Image (cartoon, rainbow, N blue to C red):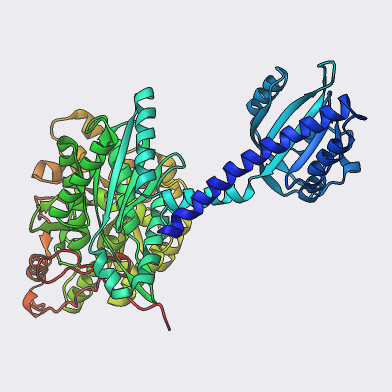
Amino acid sequence: MERFISGPLSGILWLALGLVLVGVVGWLCWRWFSVHQEEPQEDGVKNIMLSRVVEQSPMSIMLTNAVGEIEYVNPFFEETYGYRLNEVFGLNPRVLSAGKTSPDVYQEMWGTLLKGCTWQGELLNRKKSGEELWEFVTISPVKNERNELSGYASVKEDLSLLKAKEAQLFQTTYYDSVTGLPNRLLAIDRLSQALLQARRHEKMVLLVFFDLDHFKKVNDLIGFEDGNALLFLIAERLKGCIRNTDTVARYNADEFVLVLQDIPSTLVAEQLVRNVMSVMDETFVMGGQEFSLSASVGAALFPNDADDAYTLLQRAEQAMEKAKESGRGSFHFFTQTMNLVATQRIVMEHGLRMALIRKELSLVFQPILDVATEQLVSAEVLLRWNSPSLGRVSPEKFIGLAEDIGLIGALGEWVLETACRHLKAWQEAGYTIPKLAVNVSPQQFQSPDFVSTVQRALLNADVEASCLEIEITESATISNCDEAKALQTFGQLQQMGIGFSIDDFGTGYSSLSYLKRYPFDTLKIDRSFVYDVEHNQDSKMLVSTMISMAHSLGMRVIGEGVENTAHVQFLQEHECDWVQGYLYAKPMNAADFALYLKNRCGSCKTPSEIRIDSTPLPAAIGYPLPTEKSGEKPLFFTKHSTQE
């Protein structure tokens, strides 16, 4: 502690001593110059003595004439700057400037000198070698016996060492040594400054309190050194999710705070908190092992939740504690109205991540029949989620969420794998099931590994590609901005023998051009049109037009949402090919669908005799296993070793 204090104090003492020396030397220079002008013959001894003081001074001394041209520099100046007198003689002192000092400083300097006063201040200059140095400079006007300005005497003290010590002291005082982030002191200062700006411009400031879950146990396991390295990695990820105008700081041992400025709305604030939470989605590699960690996050908004820095910090920390209480690995807003929506979403998000592992997801199958013969021609595969805490969650809610959080690839892979295994088992049992139609999200279809995912699912189940049809919604086709890549994906799958259907036709931006560009085999008319064909003339015209258009393009047509004989009669009259709806069968779970197939087969195996291999979790899930007791995420989950 004594050594720490003595360093900065010694620098201050040296500065004080230097200022005294600068004053003394400056006065001696002035006396030398005035004596030299006034009494050259009368005081020769004193003149020689003053001359030696200037020559032997441990500070840089420069003398100029009245127009600012250099006429003399002492040996210490030459040693410091690397210039000999003959190299700078007659030049203006600005040749020494590094060009980085504010013009306001020079303006203030000349304003002082022109009044006949001495100026003192700090200047950033440059040596002949190009090296920069800070100097404390004293410049005094020199007058002759007639009280006329005859020149200027400049004394410079090198501040480089002192500046380095100041920078070191600032770094030690305001920055964390492990992560390089601002520490608690600087974080509070930055937050206070952000609130001042926000008041002035009537903006909001978002404060995020980020606390690592069970980090002490992690530290005990991997060691202090690796623990610090892990904190550094987390800090780098947090820095990567903020703007240059924002601040991320290490607030405590395993706590970070983020100060996010210029927040336009609470909706943006929520999205920013999700971005912060996402830094923990990817695993960390330490000591050759891959770890998954979690964090509890609290957030508070200025001016909604508090009007000063310390209260805002307190409320963000309170929100973080709430997040811990409600289950680690989540976030909580201090504002109750905002928190309700955010909490519901984060609960659903966490539940969806665990749904695959807890086997809460399942498939249902809805038959597709030939409208004329009522023969089974296909079945649509639909995903269902039955959560113990949330109940039955509509696909309209969780499919979009899965896309938002990057989980749709894992879900889609599981659906394909499971559907193909069921299909293989039913085929081996002798059931007549020509093909399955599997819905694919836009994001999944556009992923670079989608073709290989389909190939793997078919190969693992030993199913012919012709038995699989990919259903893509109309909006998915429109949203695919990379048409060349989409055509390549279609082409590769088509070469394998896979068919394609466009789902929910008529609900998006219908266009003949993309129906011609992409190799669709089937067009599915959305149930909203079929439902109205009994009474709505516009629906009748639209459905009949869709059927004619699809047939003209060589596509078969499926009418969805068929619920009564009037629907069937209309579709038959307009030569629709296939139908699907509650009139024939509702979506059924695998066991009920197997019984449905058995009843249509007669001599086939009973459903109880069918054995279906469980579908393994896809590698893309990348999420820690739940604990047996609580079902919560564990401290970490080692996925695999990165060492050979």
Counting from the top left corner in percent of width and height, residue 4 is at 45, 57
Q: Nearer the viewer, residue 219 or 545?
A: 219
The answer to which quarter of the image holds residue 53 is top right
Where residue 626 sits in the image (x, y, percent)? 17, 68
Q: Residue at x 81, y 16 (%)?
A: 147
Q: Quadrant of residue 207?
A: top left
Tell me what residue is drawn at x 42 percent, y 44 percent. 514
Q: Front-most of 631 and 435? A: 631
Residue 54 coordinates in the image, percent (x, y): 80, 41
When asked about the image quadrant of residue 32, the answer is top right
> Is residue 374 depicted above or below 427 in this figure?
above
Q: How many marks?
A: 0
Give the x, y percent position of residue 294: 26, 60
Figure quadrant of the C terminus:
bottom left
Q: Is residue 405 visible?
A: yes
Q: Pick whichever, 264 or 239, lies toward us.
A: 239
